[in-house]
């Protein structure tokens, strides 16, 4: 850190600067006292700010109509991730029309930079970035989010349904 | 010797060469699916289109023979149009499910449709649904929807493996590759069909869904599965080795390799390896660092005098044999060097294509080295020596690929008679836990971790380079021999595991970092 040391007569005029600062502080105090609606700050955590629906928060893995994971374990999100925070282990599904699915999908949320590249890379709308942004945890908390958390955490109320439906696509002949 | 001009470049080819062969030899790019240099010409994919001056229509390069003065072009607009619409026919029923498909990243069709921008087929009709995940046999899975019916795999089973398991069934757009009833694709070369499949229709059960191909790095080496010595490519990343594929070698393996050879990456991975040396004195095993264990064992070896014997298997390189045999015969002055041959009955068998009965890559190299040092011993001498007490210390260079060493347990019992056994081996084997008395197990480097030469059945020298390092502190047989003879040598452990052999090491050392003033001062604040 560098501190500017002034010498000479200028040093004696510091009081003006301090008073000027106090005036600004006083102005804000009075404004906030008499016009509370225009106050810039909120009383977190009692009050919470409403972000836009496009906000990129914690990840959500979407599910199909039957509640199973939409993800096909193609690894495009993991390939695209600049922070390398996604780990996927793929396996063979019993249903030949599903073929491949993840048995292990993990996001290390502390490494994640919330860039949204995973969402962009996903060809089947399986991973989205949701509205949640509060991720508190005590020391020892688990910040390695697995499938249970990403797809079926209680806040999602049974899972978010995907836009891409295989059956409809098959019927359309794609 | 006709001369022709391809894309403005004049080249001379042998009589009877097709245009695609000529282009292939001169490294010119031409798209092709059904043509494969190791198979016959089918001419079904219609993708290797070329324009010949004087001919009204485009021709296929794979079935047109070069004639004198031919002027050939495969970069013109006419050719591009022909390829583009040919591609569209391939994509009519192809599902384009590249994200799930295991071939994505090394797929011929993907490359082409990306080049021509055919992300969506231009057909209004619905796609014909075919069978998915068809179990063709113990090694291969078929996805008929992805198949473009190039018939490479069918031609492979009729021409190369000569087992005729595959065929094309039904007609028109309902054609499918399949096997005959109660005759699955079950031959020793079945996984070659997966290699030559230009799309993701045939996938290997072993490799399926384990890694995306773009995460893998590859390096060439020589297969250590048998005395043929095929040239192969190993694919690996930070998690280990994942698969082995053949590389074209005119003199030895051509374009193919056997299924047994493809399993040989498995014992190289860390979970199947001895990571530390173990030493047994009295009852329990203690873990030691390999170099230190070899130094400890040196006392026993040098004290043994003429009661020392060395047992070698044919799984190490010529250079290593040279080193260990010269050290044992000159420095340690023992002529008791024996060759452990595992399968005497089948050693000369050959299946007519690649697989040989001698499951050691370097038996010939070992025999040549022994001959060079004038060592001729019989296995029965070792047995009688052990029984009579003339041999008290045995150094065993064990087999790293021990799938074909069925007698390993027997041999452990035999060597236990000696009292002191120093067993050098790369891959774990439960039989070695039965070593009794004073015993060491010292981890060796496997064939992907060292440079060297194998001499194959025909006496060809098969040189290979280090692929990567899997176990950092393991020793080569040469290093182990030096240490066992009590020589002082430096064995540097490799700290960068499972990276390419030619990757440059990080040049910024800790000392450099400490000297960096900016980092240093910032730390002080």
Image (spheres, rainbow, N blue to C red):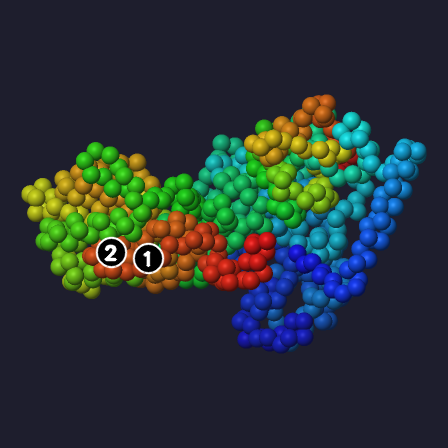
The quadrant the N terminus of chain B occupies is: bottom right
Q: Position of residue B49 (x, y in %)?
A: 69, 61
- For the residues labelled 1 and 2, the Cα–Cα distance comes to 10 Å
* Residue receiving disc 2: B483
- Earlier residue among tags 1 and 2: 2
* Residue receiving disc 1: B491
Mark 2 element type: helix
Mark 1 element type: loop
Q: Position of residue B100 (x, y in %)?
A: 64, 40
Horizontal arrangement in the rendering, residue B100 relative to residue A36 (left or right): left
Q: Residue at x 24, y 56 (%)?
A: B483
Residue B60 seen in this snapshot: yes
Horizontal arrangement in the rendering, residue B138 relative to residue A47 (left or right): left
Q: Residue at x 43, y 53 (%)?
A: B495
Nearer-the-camera pick, B491 or A35: A35
Q: Are marks 1 and 2 in contact (CB under 8 Å)?
A: yes
Q: Residue at x 82, y 57 (%)?
A: A13
Chain under callout 1? B
In this rendering, the answer to whether B280 lies above or below B340 is: above
Q: Residue at x 56, y 62 (%)?
A: B517
* Quadrant housing residue B174: top right
Which mark identifies residue B293? none
Residue B133 seen in this snapshot: no
* Quadrant housing residue B458: bottom left
């Amino acid at each position: 850190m560098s501190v500017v040391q002034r010498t000479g007569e200028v040093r004696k005029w510091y009081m003006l600067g301090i008073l000027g600062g106090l005036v600004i502080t006083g102005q804000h105090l009075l404004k906030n006292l008499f016009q509370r609606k225009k106050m810039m700050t909120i009383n977190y955590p009692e009050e919470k700010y409403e972000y836009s629906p496009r906000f990129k928060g914690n990840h959500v893995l979407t599910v199909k109509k039957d509640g199973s994971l939409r993800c096909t374990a193609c690894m495009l999100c993991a390939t695209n991730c600049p922070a390398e925070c996604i780990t996927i282990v793929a396996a063979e599904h019993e249903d030949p029309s599903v073929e491949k699915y993840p048995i292990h999908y993990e996001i290390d949320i502390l490494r994640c930079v919330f860039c949204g590249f995973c969402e962009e890379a996903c060809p089947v709308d399986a991973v989205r970035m949701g509205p949640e942004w509060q991720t508190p945890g005590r020391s020892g908390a688990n910040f390695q989010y697995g499938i249970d958390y990403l797809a079926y955490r209680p806040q999602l109320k049974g899972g978010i349904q995907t836009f891409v439906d295989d059956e409809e696509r098959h019927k359309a002949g794609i | 010797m006709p001369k022709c001009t391809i894309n403005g470049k004049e080249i001379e080819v042998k009589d009877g060469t097709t245009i695609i062969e000529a282009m292939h030899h001169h490294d010119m790019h031409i798209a092709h699916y059904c043509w494969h240099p190791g198979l016959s010409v089918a001419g079904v994919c219609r993708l290797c289109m070329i324009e010949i001056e004087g001919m009204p229509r485009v021709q296929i390069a794979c079935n047109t023979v070069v004639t004198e003065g031919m002027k050939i072009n495969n970069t013109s607009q006419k050719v591009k149009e022909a390829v583009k619409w040919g591609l569209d026919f391939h994509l009519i029923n192809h599902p384009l499910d590249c994200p799930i498909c295991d071939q994505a990243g090394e797929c011929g069709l993907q490359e082409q449709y990306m080049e021509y921008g055919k992300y969506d087929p231009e057909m209004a009709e619905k796609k014909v649904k075919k069978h998915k995940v068809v179990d063709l046999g113990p090694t291969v899975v078929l996805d008929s929807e992805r198949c473009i019916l190039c018939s490479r795999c069918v031609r492979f089973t009729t021409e190369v493996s000569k087992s005729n398991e595959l065929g094309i069934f039904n007609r028109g757009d309902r054609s499918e590759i399949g096997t005959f009833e109660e005759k699955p694709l079950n031959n020793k070369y079945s996984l070659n069909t997966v290699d030559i499949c230009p799309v993701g229709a045939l996938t290997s059960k072993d490799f399926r869904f384990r890694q995306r191909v773009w995460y893998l790095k590859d390096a060439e080496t020589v297969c250590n599965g048998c005395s043929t010595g095929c040239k192969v490519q190993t694919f690996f990343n930070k998690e280990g080795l994942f698969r082995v594929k053949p590389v074209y070698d005119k003199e030895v393996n051509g374009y193919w390799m056997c299924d047994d050879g493809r399993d040989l990456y498995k014992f190289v991975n860390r979970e199947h390896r001895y990571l530390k040396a173990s030493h047994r004195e009295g009852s329990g095993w203690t873990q030691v660092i390999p170099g230190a264990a070899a130094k400890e064992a040196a006392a026993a070896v040098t004290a043994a005098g003429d009661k020392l014997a060395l047992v070698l298997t044919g799984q190490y390189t010529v250079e290593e044999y040279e080193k260990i045999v010269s050290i044992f015969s000159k420095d340690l002055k023992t002529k008791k060097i024996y060759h452990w041959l595992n399968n005497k009955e089948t050693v000369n068998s050959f299946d007519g294509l690649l697989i040989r009965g001698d499951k050691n890559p370097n038996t010939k190299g070992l025999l040549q080295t022994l001959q060079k040092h004038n060592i001729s011993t019989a296995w029965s001498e070792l047995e009688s020596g052990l029984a009579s007490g003339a041999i008290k210390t045995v150094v065993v260079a064990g087999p790293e690929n021990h799938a074909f060493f069925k007698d390993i347990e027997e041999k452990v019992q035999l060597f236990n008679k000696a009292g002191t056994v120093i067993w050098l081996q790369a891959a774990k084997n439960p039989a070695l836990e039965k070593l009794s008395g004073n015993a060491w197990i010292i981890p060796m480097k496997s064939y992907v971790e060292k440079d060297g030469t194998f001499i194959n059945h025909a006496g060809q020298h098969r040189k290979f380079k280090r692929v990567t390092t899997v176990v950092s502190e393991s020793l080569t047989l040469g290093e182990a021999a030096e240490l066992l003879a009590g020589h002082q040598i430096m064995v540097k452990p490799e700290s960068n595991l499972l990276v390419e052999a030619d990757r440059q090491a990080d040049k910024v050392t800790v000392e450099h970092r400490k000297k960096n003033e900016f980092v240093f001062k910032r730390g002080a604040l």
